[in-house]
Image (tube, coloured by chain):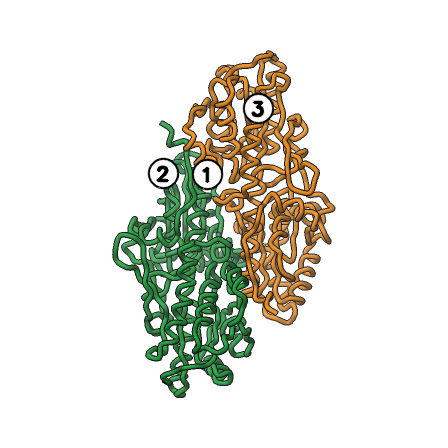
Chain colours: A orange, B green
Amino acid sequence: MSEKRKGNAVIGQSGGPTMVINQSLVGVIQEVQKHSHIDRLLGARHGVRGIINEDFLDIKNIPAELAERIALTPSAALGSTRDKPDHAYCERIFKSFEKNDVRFFFYIGGNDSCDTARIVHDMAREAKYDLNVFHIPKTIDNDLRVHDHTPGYGSAARFVAMAMIGDDYDNKSLPGVKIDVIMGRNAGFLTAASVLARKYENDGPHLIYVPEAPLSLEKFLGDVDRVYSKIGRCLIAVSEGVSAPDGKSWAEKMSEHLEKDAHGNLQLSGTGALGDFFAEQIKSKLPNPGGKKLRVRADTFGYLQRSFPMTSEVDAREARLVGQIAVKYSADPAVTEGSIAMRRVPGSDYKIETFLTPLSTVARETKHLDPSFIVNGNDISDAFKAYVRPLVGPLPTVGSFAEMK
Amino acid sequence: MSEKRKGNAVIGQSGGPTMVINQSLVGVIQEVQKHSHIDRLLGARHGVRGIINEDFLDIKNIPAELAERIALTPSAALGSTRDKPDHAYCERIFKSFEKNDVRFFFYIGGNDSCDTARIVHDMAREAKYDLNVFHIPKTIDNDLRVHDHTPGYGSAARFVAMAMIGDDYDNKSLPGVKIDVIMGRNAGFLTAASVLARKYENDGPHLIYVPEAPLSLEKFLGDVDRVYSKIGRCLIAVSEGVSAPDGKSWAEKMSEHLEKDAHGNLQLSGTGALGDFFAEQIKSKLPNPGGKKLRVRADTFGYLQRSFPMTSEVDAREARLVGQIAVKYSADPAVTEGSIAMRRVPGSDYKIETFLTPLSTVARETKHLDPSFIVNGNDISDAFKAYVRPLVGPLPTVGSFAEMK
């Protein structure tokens, strides 16, 4: 690698949007403006797809006022992509970089994006082409290895916690069984954040099911029956990725379960299907728990979790920071690649510091919820609450007549 | 009626919760504290059900700090009910009032609650029992006759507008067809509020379908095809109550439409079913509009619309106000019944004044979206935007690279 590097940079955004992915983008833009080693900053439209199509926006000199508004805007301002580049695709990326004298590549995304970054970096090294590649973390799933947590998660977790507060009061007001399906196909971090909704005794969610804790229908129905019999209502937070003891996800299994219905797949493939399936199980198999007539509803929070225009302040700040830090590392001749990670500074208050971890330590694989955070296969521990609370920030003030003596 | 009335009061909350129904409750409590004509203020647990069961909370002397926190809390703090009292039920309400020397009844709810209030008031008059009955408006559907708009609507409309902003950026980022199903079985006010999400050219929602404009599948598919072919994506806001040209709602019709599937009802009865049905129609009948591979998703916003803990400031203030005004009217010996309504003071800025309208003018029937607000059966007019904007308040700041020259 050359000692005094100089050249153009490409920045791209990838995968499912978050509320703060543009904070990281703007962090990169602002930091690039302060340094001299990056000549042009090319924003790739729709991630890697924009790179191979050379569909770039020159964004180094964007007006500060517009940059700040973009930072506040949900989802990827440059456009995102679901393309998962194979080796041939990565070669095209590399060719595009060579052609445009790109020496710096900042890629904002999850573990798949980190893997793409890793492969492209390896190709450059093989070709003895000086390319410096930085992965800027982003995912509402919070499933990146090495990283204490990931920008995007705090805001999504905040949405989930607030949604659960609201839905729990709704359920208190008109009691019944309510199922809320939460994003996170492989990791339960987002679903687990629903635990923050509890304040008073008997507050929901009363049952929390994450993908890391296999769930049988028998256990599910037994749990619901027990809660409903005790308090006359039941609020359930369930991950879209919740799985059965045989290892298959319920999203797959519910179709098998109903396979006698030849046309069942039609509706079961829909986004609301998993919640409706669980609701139907309760209605048909627990007709009268506690002797009361049962009201069962299901909602699927859907895309709102990643795009509702409301952020956790901590999350927005950290997302900006990791973008800035990536550019700082890119100015360091001793460094050619890495993912910008955060860790907590030990001590009583929440404080983080950033560090660089090799792309290979983050790429591809998923981090899961620590088993110690899961209680009885249907609840989340106080230790997890302590972990997630600072990422989400203060929640809305509420009050209840139950406080009256 | 006695000239100097004095006695106990009952307050109840009814129907689907809203974000500001407790503002009205707290408005009543605070105003009662300022007057002497109401001795005890009894909060009925779960509306009329609490009245017949004499399940009351004494809430006149609630601490101010707790009252303010309850005002901020979503859903009915006293509990709500779906009971629709018939004549016999109303008699039991009246008996409970007699027994507890209740001379004032404040009922927070929609048109059904207003009708209950009307019947109970008529019974009292027949029995020559001095009972003064006030309906305090509440509904996210905004479907009360006479009222310019209804507390609860502004906050729900704000949620919908914000959700649509987020989802539109999501859809720009990862283009495809996205369907969002919005509450309002009979009236399209909430769905229509999605129009506020538009800022830039080609912003979504691109198609808005309300119950007041019958929709054929042919029109729906033609609309989607046209939008997608033109801009490569399509965001659709559709009311859960959207109906077909034959007058039946699509929520009913989709089951018929698929009736060859003997088990179809299972999933079609679920909350996510309508969105999934429309998505499936697009996937199966418009496989490649514009020659591009189609990505179709559907979300149903569900209960979040009425309980997500976030308000429109105007809505919160007005909800408090109508509660206070109800108590003021109750002190007036010339008045025995009415619904507290708002109208706009003519002039350039948004300003409202309250007035009393007889219960019978609001009870039972639903107000619909004015046909002049509906454009082409798939869009909402600027006049509606002007109507709804002050109720929703300022929306989040956003920015786009499209602003760069």
Residue bearing the label numbered 1: A73
Residue at position x 43%, y 54% from top?
B312
Task: Specify the amino acid type for callout 1.
Answer: Thr
Q: Is residue A309 above or below residue B59?
A: above
| SS under mark 3 | helix
How far apart are the two marked residues, 2 and 3, measured between alpha carbons?
34 Å
| SS under mark 2 | loop
Q: Is residue B196 above or below residue A223?
A: above
Kindly identify which numbered label has been placed on residue B43: none
Depth check: A180 or A198 in front? A198
Depth check: A347 or A49 in front? A347
Kindly identify which numbered label has been placed on residue B200: 2
Residue at position x 48%, y 75% from top?
B10
Kindly identify which numbered label has been placed on residue A328: 3
* Residue A172 percent location from the top left of the image: 57, 64
**Image quadrant in which you'd find residue A128:** top right
